[in-house]
Image (spheres, rainbow, N blue to C red):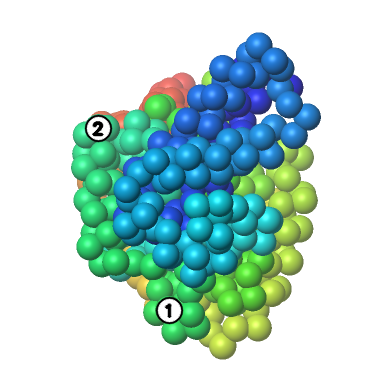
């Protein structure tokens, strides 16, 4: 791998890990210093590797430079003597000659601790997601702004406010206790769930699928599964859901960026390995005391990995949606249930149920009704497709809607 390609790759995979270890070592009040130290390590790599080539162990090289940067910085700073030195001694370091623990276990534990810091309830859910992207995934303000369809200044202020709240709350970066896990794991689940959905359904940059966000959400969820304290039935259910959804990545959008609807997808492009992992985690989740929202959504996604239509398939999906709406009602879940109802009981019944939802300001509502009306009243179908076209901001959805309109006009 060339120097020009290895550094961006390592930045994406190692930056957040290196920061997590340093955050945990130096405390939450030193966010900016830690980020500067790690960024300097990558800057030095780009300069040195350009002339001397990529070292045999580039990851180890980066960690060594980051560690040395930290040691040099705090040695020269009065901050070391006044606030950090005693803490380092208590954490098994030897005064100013401290050595960071860069073992896989400590890196893993540090990232886990940071998940609970980023998802601390002193911040709003929107801020928690932004902090997770920034602190745990290494995303900058520009990237996060793109994901949230907002401007950089909004995200920058959100991140600064979130970090200030964490500092003011004097949050200690450590392995969460059992009581902390019980109290805060729901917020962690919600953050990862929303982060994944932001990638899977995002219209940012004219993309309906942002794999980078989805992959980061899966990586963080896997960290929870791999830790005994956080390996719960709901954790497995959430990871199962992500695996099933991700298995259809390559079949969901064509080479022109157009959305391929579920019924038209080429199932040979579905990732069978991810489907298998989804089944495994779903089985791990089935031993829980109750069926969570994540378990029910994962079970629905599991049935969708069976391409063939059958009464059993759609009746089971419909039953699962009925349970999901009882556990946690949402307009989008109700809209998705209507599609399952159409497949199980017919379009006429589904139209009646869909119109009761009255989601007139959402383009997906009109796209669904357009589809349901195609066989019985093409004029009404076209009316809904045109309304959907006016409401959507997604280029991919616009292309799909225009294709449907053209198809009906040619009939």
Q: Residue furthest top?
A: 51
* Quarter of the image that includes the N terminus: top right
The label shown at residue 327 is none
Q: CA distance from mark 1 to mark 2?
A: 34 Å
Q: Position of residue 111 (x, y in %)?
A: 53, 57
When the figure is inspected, residue 143 is found, relative to residue 175, above or below; the finding is: above
State the count of labels. Answer: 2
The foreground one among 327 and 262 is: 327
Residue at left 49%, top 70%? Answer: 90
Name the front one of labels 1 and 2: 1
- Can residue 27 be seen here? The reply is yes
Residue at left 65%, top 83%? Answer: 287
Q: Is residue 40 left or right of residue 10?
A: left
Q: Position of residue 195 (x, y in %)?
A: 44, 51
Mark 2 secondary-structure assignment: loop
Q: Position of residue 193 (x, y in %)?
A: 46, 58
Q: Is residue 343 left or right of residue 327?
A: right
Q: Is residue 352 left or right of residue 24?
A: left
Marks 1,2: beta carbons within 8 A: no
Residue at left 56%, top 17%? Answer: 47
Q: Position of residue 397 (x, y in %)?
A: 41, 32
Q: Is residue 188 left or right of residue 61?
A: left
The foreground one among 284 and 402 is: 284
Residue at left 22%, top 51%? Answer: 161
When the figure is inspected, residue 244 is found, relative to residue 404, above or below; the finding is: below
The foreground one among 61 and 363 is: 61
User: Badge 2 is on which residue?
Assistant: 151
Mark 1 secondary-structure assignment: helix
User: Badge 1 is on which residue?
Assistant: 180
- Can residue 310 be seen here? The reply is no
* Mark 1 vs 2, N-terminal side: 2
């Amino acid at each position: 791998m060339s120097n020009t390609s290895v550094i961006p790759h390592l930045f994406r995979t190692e930056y957040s890990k290196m920061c997590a270890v340093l955050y945990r070592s130096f405390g939450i009040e030193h966010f900016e210093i830690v980020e500067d130290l790690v960024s300097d390590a990558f800057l030095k790599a780009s300069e040195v590797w350009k002339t001397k080539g990529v070292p045999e162990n580039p990851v180890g090289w980066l960690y060594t430079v980051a560690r040395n940067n930290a040691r040099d910085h705090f040695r020269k700073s009065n901050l070391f003597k006044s606030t950090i030195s005693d803490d380092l001694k208590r954490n098994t370091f030897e005064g100013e000659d401290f050595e960071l623990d860069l073992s896989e276990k400590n890196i893993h534990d540090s990232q886990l601790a940071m998940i609970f810091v980023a998802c601390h309830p002193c911040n709003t859910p929107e801020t928690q997601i932004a902090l997770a992207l920034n602190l745990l995934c290494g995303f900058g303000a520009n990237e996060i702004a793109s994901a949230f369809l907002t401007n950089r200044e909004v995200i920058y202020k959100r991140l600064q406010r979130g970090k200030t709240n964490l500092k003011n709350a004097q949050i200690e970066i450590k392995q969460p206790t059992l009581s902390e896990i019980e109290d805060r794991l729901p917020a962690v689940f919600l953050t990862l769930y929303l982060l994944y959905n932001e990638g899977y359904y995002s219209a940012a940059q004219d993309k309906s699928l942002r794999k980078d966000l989805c992959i980061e959400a899966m990586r963080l969820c896997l960290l929870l599964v791999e830790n005994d304290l956080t390996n719960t039935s709901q954790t497995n259910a959430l990871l199962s859901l992500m695996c099933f959804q991700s298995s259809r990545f390559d079949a969901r959008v064509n080479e022109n960026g157009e959305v391929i609807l579920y019924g038209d997808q080429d199932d040979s492009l579905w990732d069978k390995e991810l489907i298998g992992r989804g089944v495994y985690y779903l089985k791990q989740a089935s031993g829980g005391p109750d069926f969570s929202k994540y378990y029910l959504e994962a079970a629905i996604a599991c049935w969708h990995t069976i391409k063939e239509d059958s009464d059993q398939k759609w009746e089971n999906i419909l039953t699962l949606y009925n349970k999901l709406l009882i556990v946690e009602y949402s307009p989008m879940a109700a809209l998705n249930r209507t599609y399952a109802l159409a497949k199980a009981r017919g379009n006429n019944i589904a139209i009646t149920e869909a119109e009761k939802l009255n989601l007139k300001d959402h383009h997906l509502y009109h796209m669904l009704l357009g589809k349901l009306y195609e066989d019985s009243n093409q004029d009404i179908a076209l009316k809904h497709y045109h309304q959907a076209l006016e409401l959507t901001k997604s280029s991919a959805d616009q292309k799909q809607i225009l294709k449907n309109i053209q198809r009906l006009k040619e009939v």
